[in-house]
Image: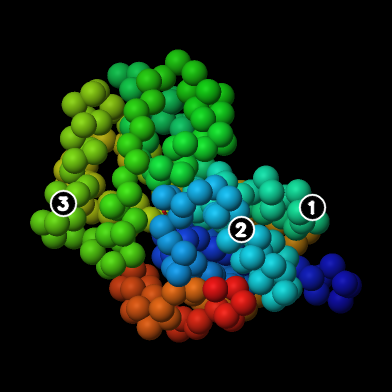
Amino acid sequence: MTAMDSFSSNPIGVYDSGVGGLSVLAAIRSLLPHEDLIYVADSGHMPYGQKSPEYVKERALKITDYFLNQNAKAVAIPCNTATAAAIKALRERYPQTPFIGIEPAIKPAARMTKSGVIGVLATTGTLLSQTFNELVKREAPNTKVLLKPCPGWVDLVESGKLSGPEVEEIVSEPLADLLKNDADVLVLGCTHFPFLLGAIRNFVGGELPVLETGLPFARQLHFQLDKRDLLNQGTAKGYFKMLTSGDPVWVQALTGDLLKSAVAVQKLPAAVC
Ligand code: DGL
């Protein structure tokens, strides 16, 4: 076994402000079943969407240091807000480490729209970021892009509320406005939001395209690892280890509900919290 072979069997660090990143887990697992994953839910510092980009960047650096101490071969960031705020700084600080970020599906939405209007639901941090605004200019120069920051949506998911009258009411408000203004494609630009898809569909119906980026993100992760010869060559199913800066008891219960399977959640070391 060469040194590279043994490095390729190291785990991948995956993190989000909380449980949102779990919405891309099925896609990662199906494309990369043999990879070991260490998932950090930074629940002690969520929601990222209302924090300053500097704060989100500090957390990114701290969590990345933790992953690298665990010998992670790559860091995957299924968090639109953290990607927008921090991925550039991470790549500058750790040029040898592959970082895979996520961004809202503006490009496919701009291609699909017939009305010329798309609606983007994301956090305030994402929508205000330079990265997002450059993405819109580049990929949708001739499309009307309506922006909806949905701060309450992340809190709903983090408190385990995915359905019921309160959820329907909170979710329907920005959606009603987007539909009224002719949006015919919706973009979920926050990884927490796919967990609210039931409530979203109840309001917009089954036909309207509602785009999320789990699969393209997993494909990109696969591509970046493959390109560097970093795919795990083992044949055993990879492990999934989960830690949080928040309350592990709560995060474990919530994760069990969202993934419909039991996952043990540990507290991150105090220095990372
Ligand atoms: N899940 C995250 C995103 O994709 C962040 C949500 C938050 O903490 O505000 O943007």
Asked if the residues shown at circle 2 and circle 1 are in contact, with their CB atoms under 8 angstroms apart, the answer is: no
> Horizontal placement of 206 versus 54: left or right?
left
Q: Amino acid at mark 2?
A: Glu
C-alpha distance separating marks 2 and 1: 17 Å
Judged from this view, the residue extending furthest toward the right is: 2
How many numbered discs, if any?
Answer: 3
Q: Residue at x 88, y 72 (%)?
A: 3
Q: Position of residue 222 (x, y in %)?
A: 64, 55
User: Can residue 168 be seen from the camera position used here?
Assistant: yes
The mark closer to the camera, 2 or 1, is 2
The mark closer to the camera, 3 or 2, is 2
Q: Position of residue 18 (x, y in %)?
A: 44, 64
Along the line of sight, the residue nearer the viewer: 113 or 50: 50
Along the line of sight, the residue nearer the viewer: 190 or 185: 190
> Horizontal placement of 184 versus 54: left or right?
left
Q: Position of residue 80 (x, y in %)?
A: 49, 48
User: Colour scheme of this structure image?
Assistant: rainbow
Q: Residue at x 34, y 41 (%)?
A: 149
Along the line of sight, the residue nearer the viewer: 107 or 70: 70
Query: Which sits earlier in the primary sequence, circle 2 or circle 1?
Result: 2
Judged from this view, the residue extending furthest toward the left is: 165
C-alpha distance separating marks 3 and 2: 35 Å
Q: Circle 3 sits on which residue?
A: 168
Q: Amino acid at mark 1?
A: Pro
* Residue 95 numbered tag: 1
Q: Circle 2 sits on which residue?
A: 58
Q: Secondary structure at mark 3?
A: helix
The answer to which quarter of the image holds residue 73 is: bottom right
Query: Which sits earlier in the primary sequence, circle 3 or circle 2?
Result: 2
Q: Is residue 133 above or below residue 164?
A: above
Q: Secondary structure at mark 2?
A: helix
Query: Which sits earlier in the primary sequence, circle 3 or circle 1?
Result: 1
